[in-house]
Image: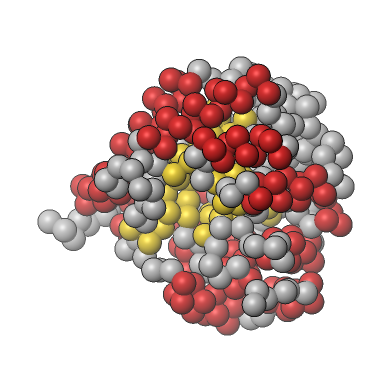
Amino acid sequence: MATRWTLSQAQALFEKPFLELMFEAQQIHRQHFDPRQVQVSTLLSIKTGACPEDCKYCPQSARYKTGLESERLMEVEEVLSSARKAKAAGSGRFCMGAAWKNPHERDMPYLEKMVQGVKAMGMETCMTLGSLSQQQAQRLAHAGLDYYNHNLDTSPEFYGSIITTRSYQERLDTLGEVREAGIKVCSGGIVGLGETVQDRAGLLVQLANLPEPPESVPINMLVKVKGTPMADNDDVDPFDFVRTIAVARIMMPKSHVRLSAGREQMSEQTQAMCFMAGANSIFYGCKLLTTPNPEEDKDLLLFRKLGLNPQHGTTQSGDNAQQQALAAQLLSADTEQFYNAAL
């Protein structure tokens, strides 16, 4: 029977001594995953900017002057070309994001072709397109979509301070439609919005207590973008962020916990602690939608320093060439600062 978490239980985890929390999270992580395996994904913005929503953290909102130029939905072949490059670079999952409140019916045939094309390459597919109707979720499922991302962002209590154009219940409803259609759920939140520890605990309680916890839980550190209302928010203490990763791992032991946005501003040591705390998924590449991400070479070197390996894909088509490609890069990546023990 699935564990039903209470807010007080989640808060108690956050209040544990740091090293005890890390030890518990790592023990649970090892019960369900190979601690040296990390899922590697690539995220592409297939439609950028001009979003009607008012999410205070997001540079894609049409309400804020961030200097971001809006772009129309990419052509299908353009998306597939990016997917081929991602696979060649070692990614096993390709995620496609569009800055919409919800997809229009006229765009659905193109989205379906994108999913089908990426699946044909032997990669897992993921999309984040805003709210979905039951019919839209079913159409994407029939096209072969593996995962759908729709973050809850924060606790229900703090949510109204961040977003007013979409209710918390709407987000939960979309997750329900996705699950009902047979698509795996990807849902997480953001640390650094001005929330309290209780809000972080509340977010994780919402996720863990879904009828079925998300298969993938992205934990983002706020990327402060000039022009957004949260551009001057306080920095997140690295230990507080690592605690959030650890509590997510304990509360959702079978989920992939993704170290997502904000890695560009994290030290290697902070990222290493996140992996120790149970993070086992990253976005690989130089950009996350509209914000920077560590360059591929930096990720390769960090993987080598920590003895981490890219996780084998689970798709049936293809031959896991992406895993072999990334493994080859891990062996060949060399700098003056890093001794290549394989030589």
The quadrant where residue 165 appears? top right
Above or below: residue 25 compared with residue 294: below
**Extreme residue in the left direction:** 343
How is the protein colored in the picture? secondary structure
Report which quarter residue 157 is drawn in: bottom right
Using the image as rendered, state which of residue 266 and residue 76 is in the foreground: 76
Left or right relative to 184: residue 302: left
Asked if residue 210 is positioned above or below residue 149 in the image, the reply reads: below
Q: Residue at x 50, y 18 (%)?
A: 75
- Seen in the picture, residue 150 relative to 17 is either above or below; the reply is above
Q: Is residue 230 among the parts visible in the rendering?
A: yes
| Position of residue 332 measured from the top left corner of the image (x, y, whole percent) | 21, 47
- In the rendered image, the quadrant that contains the C terminus is bottom left
Where is residue 169 shown, x and y percent of the image? 82, 49
Is residue 291 at all visible to an observer of this figure?
no
Position of residue 59 relative to residue 325, above or below, is above
Query: On the rendered image, what quadrant is the N terminus found in?
Result: bottom right
**How many labels were placed on the picture?**
0
Work out whether residue 145 or residue 82 is closer to the camera in this orientation and state it. Answer: 145
Q: Nearer the viewer, residue 317 or 90?
A: 317
Residue drawn 58% across and 36% down?
140
Q: Is residue 22 left or right of residue 210?
A: left
Q: Nearer the viewer, residue 338 or 24?
A: 24
Residue at the image point whose x is 52% and y is 60% from the top: 256
Q: Position of residue 303 (x, y in %)?
A: 35, 56
Write the residue at 30% across / 42% down: 318
Percent position of residue 331, x then y: 22, 52
